[in-house]
Image: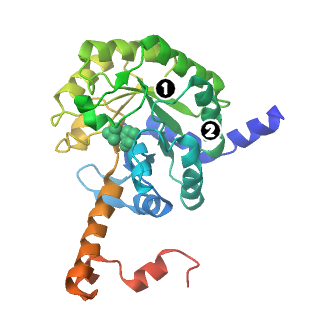
Amino acid sequence: MLQSLLGRVESDPRKGQLRRALSNKKCLRVLEAHSPLSALVAEHAAIQDDSRGERVIYDALWSSSLTDSTLLGKPDIEMINIRNRVSNFNDIFEVTTTPLIVDGDTGGKVEHFVINVRSLERIGVSAVIIEDKIGLKKNSLLGTDVYQQQDSIENFCHKIRSGKAAQVGDDFMIIARIESLILDAGMEDALERADAYVDAGADGIMIHSRSTTPGEVLQFAEQFRAKFPDVTLVCVPTSYAATHFSELEDAGFNIVIYANHMLRSAYVAMQRVASEILRCGRTLEIEPYCTKIDEILDLIPGTR
Ligand code: SPV
Ligand code: MG
């Protein structure tokens, strides 16, 4: 029984691809995908960067709690939990080969988290990121405008340790997300938590910020790197959007997540089209904002 479970977990090549990419590249680019179609768009996006002499692609996909919830018309309060999202992950896996990093919210109850770790690992997810909050989770970018509570270091370390003990193979990663800067608990608190979470077995640290400038995450990266030269460091530059990838890469980040941009961009297009059809009384005017019918019919193999 255990043998067959181990066989299934270890036979999925996608899962280990994230660790391989991390050992081959200084820093990975990760794009949010909320559906198989958005995942396909992300997987096919590529540019030639002559200044770096490389073909630039997204190395992994991010399944965001914010966009998965928003897509279903629900608030980002951990109501659409990991188990509700698994079928979406599977649908994405059916049509792509890019590794997936899952936003695991707070990880929930430890007893639930350990089961979810195994489920994610079994279906081929490469990593889960859990944030150190408890109680009713609200989106981090709301900061202190809403009531949000940070977990104790002790509790969160227990969750990390339990998750690591639950996974079957070596490839799956559990990344601990620190919310100290989001909740104005300060840099010292963030660094103390990073120490403790790495010590508890976290495979990486995500430092989140809602500042519109990168100063605090760059400061965190400098101090973290001095102590942990090799531990995976992750950031999500949604609010400090003017900061270039190369600046974060040079600061020592290993994963940069563009966390919600596929859904936000699709939403703008849908709003425009919905109101313009009403305004114009026909669809001719919005054609330039739509994929051509021939293109959509050719997009997915097997449609014709
Ligand atoms: C998400 O994408 O759901 C995240 C990142 O958790 S943030 O929205 O910035 O909290
Ligand atoms: Mg989230």
Q: Is residue 264 left or right of residue 160?
A: left
Answer whether labels 2 and 1 touch (C-beta < 8 Å): no
Q: Earlier in the sequence, mark 2 or mark 1?
A: 2
* Disc 2 C-beta below 8 A from ligand 2: no
Depth check: 272 or 181 in front? 272
Instruction: Tell me what residue is drawn at x 44 percent, y 50 percent.
Output: 68
* CA separation in Å, label 2 and label 1: 14 Å
* Disc 1 C-beta below 8 A from ligand 1: no
Instruction: Tell me what residue is drawn at x 40 percent, y 32 percent.
Output: 137
> How many numbered marks does the figure carry?
2
Residue 112: x percent and y percent? 61, 30
* Type of the residue with mark 2: Glu
Instruction: Tell me what residue is drawn at x 52 percent, y 21 percent.
Output: 160
Find ligand 1 in the image and state its quadrant. Answer: top left
Residue 125 visible at all: no
Q: Nearer the viewer, mark 2 or mark 1?
A: 2
The C terminus - image quarter: bottom right
- Which mark is drawn over residue 301? none
Residue 25: x percent and y percent? 40, 39
Q: Secondary structure at mark 1?
A: loop
Residue 82: x percent and y percent? 54, 41
Residue 190 visible at all: yes
Depth check: 46 or 148 in front? 148
User: What residue would you read off at disc 2?
Assistant: 121
Q: Secondary structure at mark 2?
A: helix
Instruction: Tell me what residue is drawn at x 42 percent, y 85 percent.
Output: 294
Up the image or down, 34 lies above or below 41; here it is above
Identity of the residue furthest to the right in this view? 1
* Type of the residue with mark 1: Asp
User: What residue would you read off at disc 1?
Assistant: 203
Name which quarter of the figure residue 213 lies in: top left
Depth check: 248 or 21 in front? 248
